[in-house]
Image: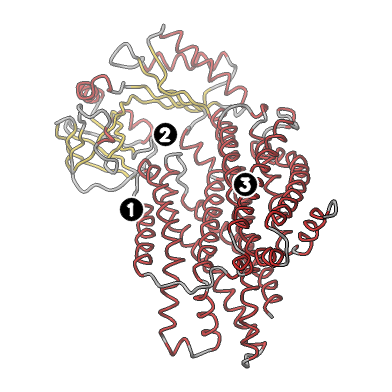
């Protein structure tokens, strides 16, 4: 054959089949662009090596996996539409070797265009994404640098090339193994009516119910984190089974209802048409539902963390500076007067003043609640071995410390306590702790009193107010006996606000106070916790800003995948339905009735995944809130608003995709 024949034939095939090739090419370009952007950002040394870079590297891994899976998936649509053409060429005399050469030329053309345009756009958009990331982090341009990394260009090209090579080998394998008749009928594969399978439909309901149950029933943060991915797998399996087996079973039940099935032409056409190829349809619909759910959960959760950053900051660090001081060489912490004197001296030396100062003596340890007894089993290496639902962090405070910042005067006996509990109500009035009986004489909800503390504990925190320091010291000693080397040390917790809001001054005072206390104690103390709002805000901005950026980035990637799946599904459905509608027109169905049937079927097919995604997202909400509680994010109204807004925006985008693809479908079948 003439030199360049295969290249011309390949280029002509791409132009001739542009309705299916151009969206695929656009997807490959955008995938290459986004892979370059995320790889460049994750390799940018000016972003440091902390939480942000780790988050970006995770985003790069997900994007790479996405590129492999999704380009393979979309290529299957191309091969299905092209098999008939390849079969015809084979019958007309072109050998499979020559067809494989044409496919090679087509693949190479698509690869070169994808790499050149995709990486070129990636270099341009890299700067835009870089600036967006800096905006989220609140970082000045002078502190970060934009750069083009040749290594990133090479790695992106290698990854995309490897994916295209695998796609090429898979396509050649399909052509090689099929005979010409199979190739001619390749576009019709999957048209056999599937059977109703009650067992799989029931199994799908069980998987889905299990996933929903885990999200709703598990209330503590640790178990939610451990079981979240189990719930995700259950929901994914349940979705696939219900869309494939459950939908067919439901449609066949509708077909048995003669009044419904034969009552209107639209019912007859839609039910029979969907049953005819439902197995293939159902997989695509399940993919769209799962991708939509991933986008919604990813977007609303990262937005919730970002916009709830101030709530998290206040929960972690309620004042400008927090210190938790432990004297590891004695049973009691550093003397309160000594600490306050060091604090005042350090602040004066920094030429500022104290606005507020709060402190208290406390002991914190874990306990597992069974009835009205808190178990403290010294034989258990970890109390979480017992269970997690009853596990709590117990914190104790003397009545005089409690009165200083709440105004509540407690006249307690040695065997009496007050309880401040933010988790769930208690019915009993008596409690046993370290085998000693205590009577609960008064309860407070966590919101009723202000205790300067933190939300660093992932288990529920319960405060017990005891008579005085002597009773508290007795419990400290009992805790030491019970836990041995795992016992907690008592601590003096110090919370400080300065009269200034200048970040540099706060940072200087913070470090000066630590130096003063260490010098005064002569090496006998350690800090269980030191924190200031300036540093913590920077850390949260880096972590949550990175998560929000990656969430938006991957959300855009998954949305692109969803749009392309819907588009190819509608194109494939259009070509397969065209012959059926042509026959129906011949037997008397009007164009108006056909148009109504088209819109009815597309609406049913399109918005079932959206409804499913909404239900999945709503059931995921409890699990997400429990996990976020571990990050001190407990602003439920804010999370509900973020979820609602995310769904509305996504639904509007979904509707636009519906209008565009419905028009293409109608053009094909009408």
What distance separates the C-alpha of mark 3 from that of mark 1?
44 Å
Q: Quadrant of the C terminus?
A: bottom right
Q: Which residue lies most toward the bottom here?
A: 588
Query: First in sequence: mark 2 or mark 3?
Result: 3
Q: Which mark is residue 166?
A: 3
Q: Mark 2 = which residue?
A: 456
Is the image coloured rainbow, by chain, by secondary structure, or in one colour?
secondary structure
In the image, 543 versus 339, the foreground residue is 543
Which structural element holds mark 3? Answer: helix
In the image, 448 versus 407, the foreground residue is 448
Query: First in sequence: mark 2 or mark 1?
Result: 1
**Which quarter of the picture shows residue 423?**
top left
> Which residue: 60% across, 37% down?
56
Residue 79 spot, x, y in % from top left: 64, 60
Which structural element holds mark 1? Answer: helix
Q: Mark 1 = which residue?
A: 217
In the image, 408 versus 48, the foreground residue is 48
Specify few, some or many for label 2: CA neighbours under 10 Å numbering under 14, 14-19, or 20 or more: some
In the image, is residue 562 above or below residue 220? Answer: below
**Between marks 3 and 1 in the image, the one whose residue lies nearer the viewer:** 3
Mark 3 vs 1: CB contact within 8 A: no
Residue 178 spot, x, y in % from top left: 59, 61
């Amino acid at each position: 054959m003439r030199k360049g024949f295969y290249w011309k034939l390949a280029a002509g095939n791409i132009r001739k089949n542009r309705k299916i090739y151009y969206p695929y090419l656009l997807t490959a370009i955008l995938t290459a662009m986004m892979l370059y952007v995320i790889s460049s950002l994750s390799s940018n040394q000016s972003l440091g090596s902390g939480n942000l870079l780790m988050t970006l590297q995770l985003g790069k891994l997900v994007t790479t996996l996405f590129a492999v899976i999704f380009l393979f998936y979309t290529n299957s649509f191309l091969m299905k539409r092209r098999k008939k053409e390849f079969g015809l060429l084979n019958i007309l005399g072109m050998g499979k070797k020559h067809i494989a050469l044409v496919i090679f030329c087509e693949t190479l053309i698509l690869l070169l265009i994808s790499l050149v345009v995709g990486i070129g756009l990636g270099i341009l958009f890299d700067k835009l994404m870089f600036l967006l990331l800096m905006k989220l982090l609140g970082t000045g341009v002078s502190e970060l640098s934009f750069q083009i990394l040749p290594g990133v260009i090479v790695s992106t090209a290698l990854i995309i090339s490897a994916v295209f090579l695998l796609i090429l080998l898979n396509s050649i394998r399909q052509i090689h193994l099929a005979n010409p008749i199979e190739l001619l009928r390749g576009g019709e594969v999957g048209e056999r009516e599937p059977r109703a399978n009650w067992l799989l439909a029931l199994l799908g309901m069980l998987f889905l119910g299990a996933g929903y149950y885990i999200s709703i029933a598990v209330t503590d943060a640790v178990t939610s984190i451990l079981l979240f991915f189990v719930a995700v797998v259950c929901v994914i399996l349940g979705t696939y089974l219900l869309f494939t087996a459950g939908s067919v079973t439901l449609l066949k039940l509708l077909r048995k209802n003669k009044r419904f099935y034969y009552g209107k032409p639209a019912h007859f056409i839609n039910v029979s048409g969907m049953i005819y190829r439902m197995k293939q349809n159902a997989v695509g619909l399940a993919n769209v539902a799962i991708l939509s759910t991933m986008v919604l959960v990813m977007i609303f959760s990262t937005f919730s963390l970002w916009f709830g950053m101030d709530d998290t900051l206040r929960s972690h660090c309620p004042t400008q500076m927090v210190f938790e001081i432990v004297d590891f060489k004695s049973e009691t912490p550093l003397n309160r007067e000594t600490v306050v004197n060091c604090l005042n001296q350090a602040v004066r030396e920094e030429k500022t003043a104290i606005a507020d100062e709060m402190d208290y003596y406390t002991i914190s340890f874990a306990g597992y609640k069974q009835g009205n007894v808190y178990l403290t089993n010294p034989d258990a290496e970890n109390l979480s071995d017992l269970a997690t639902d009853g596990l709590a962090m117990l914190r104790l405070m003397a009545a005089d410390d409690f009165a200083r910042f709440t105004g509540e005067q407690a006249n307690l006996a040695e065997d009496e306590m007050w309880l401040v509990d933010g988790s769930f109500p208690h019915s009993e009035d008596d409690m046993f702790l370290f085998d000693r009986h205590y009577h609960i004489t008064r309860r407070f909800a966590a919101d009723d009193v202000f205790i300067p503390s933190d939300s660093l504990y992932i288990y529920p925190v319960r405060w017990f107010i005891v008579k005085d320091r002597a009773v508290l010291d007795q419990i400290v000693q009992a805790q030491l006996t019970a836990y041995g080397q795992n016992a907690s040390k008592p601590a003096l917790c110090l919370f400080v606000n300065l009269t200034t809001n200048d970040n540099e001054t706060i940072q200087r005072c913070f470090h000066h106070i630590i130096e003063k206390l260490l010098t005064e104690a002569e090496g006998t103390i350690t800090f269980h916790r030191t924190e200031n709002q300036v540093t913590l805000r920077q850390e949260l901005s880096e972590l949550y800003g990175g998560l929000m950026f990656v969430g938006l980035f991957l959300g855009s990637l998954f949305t692109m995948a969803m749009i392309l799946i819907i588009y190819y599904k509608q194109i494939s459905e259009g070509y397969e339905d065209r012959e059926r509608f042509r026959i129906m027109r011949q037997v008397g169905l009007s164009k108006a009735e056909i148009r109504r049937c088209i819109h009815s079927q597309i609406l049913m097919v399109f918005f079932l995944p959206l409804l499913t995604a909404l239900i999945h997202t709503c059931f995921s909400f409890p699990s997400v809130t429990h996990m976020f509680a571990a990050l001190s994010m407990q602003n439920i109204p804010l999370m509900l608003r973020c979820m609602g807004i995310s769904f509305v925006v996504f639904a509007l985008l979904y509707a636009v995709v519906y209008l565009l693809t419905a028009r293409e479908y109608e053009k094909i079948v009408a």
